[in-house]
């Protein structure tokens, strides 16, 4: 077929979006201190800031919401949610939370003490911050090829098992209260983690008595990549693959805003009931009672339906093809696109696109702002504004491994012509690349600075 993909849905409701002029966008960006997080969403034409909580829910999810049981304790909706989590991941116990970072917070506040270390293939920003505020050390151990935007390998999100074992031996397992892996690896260009790597990571943690948790946000996209890139799994269903991925884990944290296709929600799931009981006490103080955890009954219903819809092969095939289509459009526009293209987003090597801007002047932010000016498109930097941090020993600033610009795609929201439009704006940007200027931080908070930073052009 010559058509690259067809959306496996039709549209029942529309939301108007408004085009602005370049002059207006210059004003908006100036008022936002050159930080797209400060721009109003209505002043954005195509919003690719994040795929988190920005998806369109299905008719079945919306009708599920009408069934929401809003009882404080023991609501029917909770039990439907619990059943969907059990059926999908195989974990017997689950606690809902208002979103992913709350799940991480609850887990870490219960298990992690100041001075301890938590390894991960790569922590996402809020996961890292949840550890830093406890005085703990998040350590990232993605395989080296994950930081090479050009090498075309199937599972560049994998954990470096050799480095992981070295770290455990150096620190001693008693200083590692839990170990994690993130699927797909969002900070490493949305690259998937292979089944073998998940199982070997689990075995390694378990050999040293360390509990293993998966950051499960994009579990279905990861499973689809296993199915389509590892011949051993081509005849297995996505459901079977998901169960096999999670079989070796002690639990998971989940932002339902991604692969449960809802606008808010999250959870922590476990194999061990006593750990659930421990975390439940903290949950009641900070999130809510065990059977709602900061969500309404209708949110739990939407998650239960979303978890079942997201593993449908039609949906996943469309999802990955849609993202690849944008990646190909950006490559054709002349942007250096990270290869292979991930599931939820296209990542551009901004450092290479703007070689005249050093990492200390944030080429990812500069390119994001240029794209906004060119076409009202909002993207986000995944580079040194987000991830640079002082070395705990020397105090020297450690830069991010790559200066990436992420085009994250909301689920079931934009059509192919929206993506074509983004490709055209990229062509305009590439033509002007030489005149795009770097930025410096005029002001920023100490933790998670990219959200609130005020930036000035150099
Ligand atoms: N873990 C990963 C891998 C994530 O990508 C995110 C969120 C979280 C945890 C936290 O979940 O937002 O529900 O609290 N990532 C979003 C993004 C915000 O844009 O990639 P949350």
Image: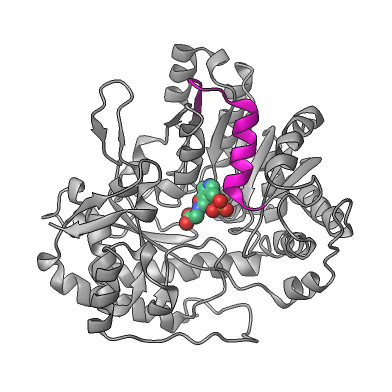
Residue under the image location 35 percent in, 52 percent down: 450
Residue under the image location 20 percent in, 47 percent down: 359
Residue under the image location 24 percent in, 63 percent down: 367
Give residue 418's quadrant in the image. bottom left
**392 lies left or right of 55:** left
Colouring: one colour
Q: Is residue 90 visible?
A: no
Q: Is residue 27 visible?
A: yes
Q: Foreground residue, 192 or 95?
A: 95
Magenta-colored stretch includes residue 103: yes
Decide: is 302 above or below 100: below
Find the magenta span and give its range.
Answer: 98-118
Q: x, y percentage for residue 340? A: 39, 55
Decide: is 13 above or below 448: below
**419 lies left or right of 103:** left
**232 lies left or right of 60:** left
Q: x, y percentage for residue 78? A: 83, 54
């Amino acid at each position: 077929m010559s058509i690259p993909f067809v959306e496996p849905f039709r549209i029942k409701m529309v939301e108007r979006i408004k085009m602005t002029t370049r002059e207006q966008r210059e004003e908006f960006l100036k008022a936002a201190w050159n930080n797209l997080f400060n721009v109003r969403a209505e002043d954005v034409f195509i919003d690719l800031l994040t795929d988190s909580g920005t998806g369109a829910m299905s008719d079945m999810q919306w009708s599920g919401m009408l069934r929401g049981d809003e009882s404080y304790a023991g609501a029917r909706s909770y039990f439907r949610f619990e059943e969907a989590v059990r059926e999908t991941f195989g974990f017997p116990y689950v606690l809902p939370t208002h979103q992913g970072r709350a799940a991480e917070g609850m887990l870490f506040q219960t298990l992690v003490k100041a001075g301890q270390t938590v390894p991960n293939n790569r922590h996402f920003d809020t996961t890292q911050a949840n550890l830093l505020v406890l005085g703990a050390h998040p350590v990232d151990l993605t395989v080296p090829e994950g930081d090479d935007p050009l090498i075309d390998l199937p599972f560049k999100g994998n954990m470096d098992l050799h480095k992981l074992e070295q770290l455990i031996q150096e620190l001693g397992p008693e200083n590692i209260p839990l170990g994690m892996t993130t699927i797909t690896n969002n900070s490493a260009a949305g690259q998937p983690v292979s089944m073998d790597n998940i199982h070997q990571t689990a075995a390694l943690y378990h050999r040293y008595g360390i509990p293993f948790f998966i950051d499960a946000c994009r579990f279905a996209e990861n499973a689809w990549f296993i199915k389509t890139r590892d011949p051993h799994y081509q005849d297995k269903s996505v459901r079977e693959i998901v169960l096999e991925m999670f079989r070796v884990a002690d639990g998971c944290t989940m932002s339902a805003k991604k692969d449960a296709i809802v606008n808010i929600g999250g959870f922590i799931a476990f194999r061990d009931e006593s750990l659930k009981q421990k975390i439940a006490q903290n949950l009641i103080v900070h999130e809510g009672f065990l059977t709602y955890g900061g969500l309404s009954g209708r949110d739990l219903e939407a998650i239960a339906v979303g978890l079942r819809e997201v593993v449908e092969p039609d949906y996943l095939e469309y999802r990955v093809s849609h993202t690849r289509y944008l990646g190909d459009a950006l490559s054709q526009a002349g942007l250096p696109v990270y290869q292979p293209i991930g599931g939820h987003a296209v990542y551009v090597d901004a450092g290479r696109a703007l070689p005249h801007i050093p990492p200390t002047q944030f080429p990812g932010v500069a390119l994001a702002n240029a794209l906004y000016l060119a076409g009202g498109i909002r993207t986000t930097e995944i580079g040194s504004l987000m991830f640079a941090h002082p070395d705990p020993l020397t105090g020297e600033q450690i830069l991010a491994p790559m200066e990436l610009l992420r085009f994250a795609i909301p689920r079931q929201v934009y059509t192919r012509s929206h993506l074509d439009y983004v490709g055209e704006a990229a062509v305009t940007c590439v033509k002007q690349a030489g005149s795009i200027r770097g930025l410096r931080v005029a002001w920023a908070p100490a933790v998670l600075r990219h959200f609130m930073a005020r930036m000035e052009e150099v």
